[in-house]
């Protein structure tokens, strides 16, 4: 991927994370590894590697969060 694509993906995952936190689906403390990177989507001066690390940290936190959401017998979220 090009740097622009890493930044775009980083921004999309940051939006998803914000949505999950806003709806109290994800606790903020799940973002410790991401916050330690000190790279946000608007950090366009950072390297592709830094954005890649941020993408991996966010996707890991989102994945763990989504695994914990209770589902009914049809595999759909109980909240739906």
Image (spheres, helix red, strand yellow):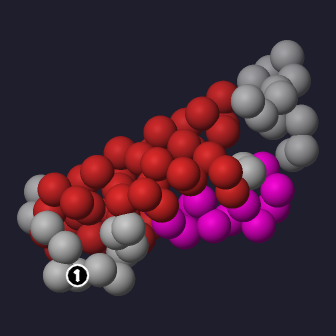
x 89%, y 36%: residue: 78
40 horizontally vs 46: left or right:
right
x 73%, y 30%: residue: 68
- Residue 73: % across, % down: 85, 16
Residue furthest toward the front?
36
17 horizontally vs 68: left or right:
left
- Residue 61: % across, % down: 54, 43
Q: Which residues are magenta?
A: 13-25
- Residue 17: % across, % down: 59, 59
Nearest the viewer among 30 and 14 is 30
The residue under label 1 is: 44
The vertical placement of 77 against 43, above or below, is: above
Label 1 residue SS: loop
Q: Is 22 within the magenta? A: yes
Residue 58 is at least partly visible in this image: no
The vertical placement of 64 against 80, above or below, is: above
4 horizontally vs 17: left or right:
left
Nearest the viewer among 12 and 35 is 35
18 horizontally vs 53: left or right:
right
- Residue 54: % across, % down: 35, 56
Instruction: Report the quarter where the N terminus lies.
Output: bottom left
């Amino acid at each position: 991927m090009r740097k622009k694509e890493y930044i775009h993906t980083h921004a999309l995952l940051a939006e998803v994370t914000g949505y999950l936190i806003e709806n109290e689906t994800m606790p903020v403390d799940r973002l410790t590894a991401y916050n330690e990177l000190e790279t946000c989507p608007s950090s366009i001066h950072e390297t592709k590697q830094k954005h890649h690390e941020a993408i991996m940290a966010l996707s890991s936190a989102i994945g763990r969060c989504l695994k914990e959401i209770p589902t009914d017998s049809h595999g759909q979220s109980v909240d739906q």
